[in-house]
Image (tube, grey):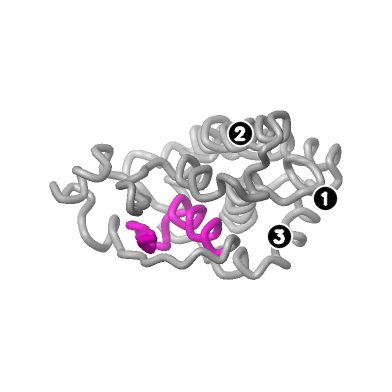
Amino acid sequence: MTIPKVLGRTSSINVRKVLWTLDELHVAYEREDWGHGFSSTSDPKFLKLNPNALVPVLIDQHGPIWESNAICRYVGAGTPLFPEDRRQRALVDQWMDWQATELNTAWRYAFAGLVRKTPGFTDPEQIQASITAWNTVMGLLSARLVDTGCYVAGDQFTLADIVLGLSVHRWLFSPIERETWPAVSAYYERLKLRPAFQRWSLPEVP
């Protein structure tokens, strides 16, 4: 079997999702730096792999796969990270999709303005609105963790915890005022015990 290759810079949270998943499963892989500060994703060679010009891309013997959550599902299929049970798998999917839509939408403006310093994301009112929305959705995650008492989909660690764990890390280390959610703090402490999380919970950079 061909060793999979991951294209993408480790400063990307979406790349780190994939790398954490691979490390959690002890899958050997190669990685090439692409994206901001490295090889351009506008290169025709890259666009043939992902026409969206975004990282990450995973390439194995079957060809390329893009979209970070899709890659995580692909890698995690047939393992406890992505349960075979229909109900449990739906819960994992539910929270992975929520991360990609509701949670990402909430933090996008504030993170772009305060951390990435992206031009055009400097409106104080919109930054504050984004921070408020970010704290609100983290409150929804907190309520879920209170219900389960452990991980997002239940008692077992799954792909949902990989994509949300890095999101929690981003929330905790961004320069914003945060609500106090004890269940989220306890969850983060549980994740910190995992060696693969320790490796990929890097300081947030643009």
In the figure, is residue 108 to the left or right of 128?
A: left
Q: How far from the left and from the top, in percent, is residue 108?
A: 48, 39
In which quadrant of the rendered image does the C terminus lie?
A: bottom left
Q: Is residue 180 above or below residue 8?
A: above
Give the residue displayed 57% in from the left and 30% down from the top: 102
Using the image, tell me which numbered label, if any, was put on residue 191: 3
Foreground mark, 2 or 1, reads: 2
* Cα–Cα gap, marks 2 and 1: 25 Å
Of 151 and 72, nearer the camera is 72
Local crowd at mark 2 within 10 Å, few (<14), some, or many (≥20)?
some
> Is 153 in front, or is 187?
153
User: Secondary structure under badge 1?
Assistant: helix
Quadrant for the N terminus, please. bottom left
The label shown at residue 182 is 1
The answer to whether one can see residue 88 in this image is yes
In the visual, does 126 lie left or right of 41? Answer: right
Amino acid identity at mark 1: Pro
Three-letter code for the amino acid on which mark 3 is drawn: Leu
Give the residue drawn at x 35%, y 50%.
Answer: 57
Label 2 sits on residue: 93
Q: Is residue 11 above or below residue 112?
A: below
Place of residue 169 in the rendered image (x, y in percent of width and height, measured from the top left):
61, 56
Does 91 appear above or below 71? above
Above or below residue 196? Residue 155 is above
Residue drawn 76% across the image and 61% down it: 189
Mark 1, mark 3: which one is toward the viewer? 3
Q: Residue 23: where, in percent of width, then height?
A: 55, 64
Highlighted range, magenta: 1-23
Asked whether residue 177 appears in the rendered view, the answer is no
Q: Residue furthest left?
A: 44
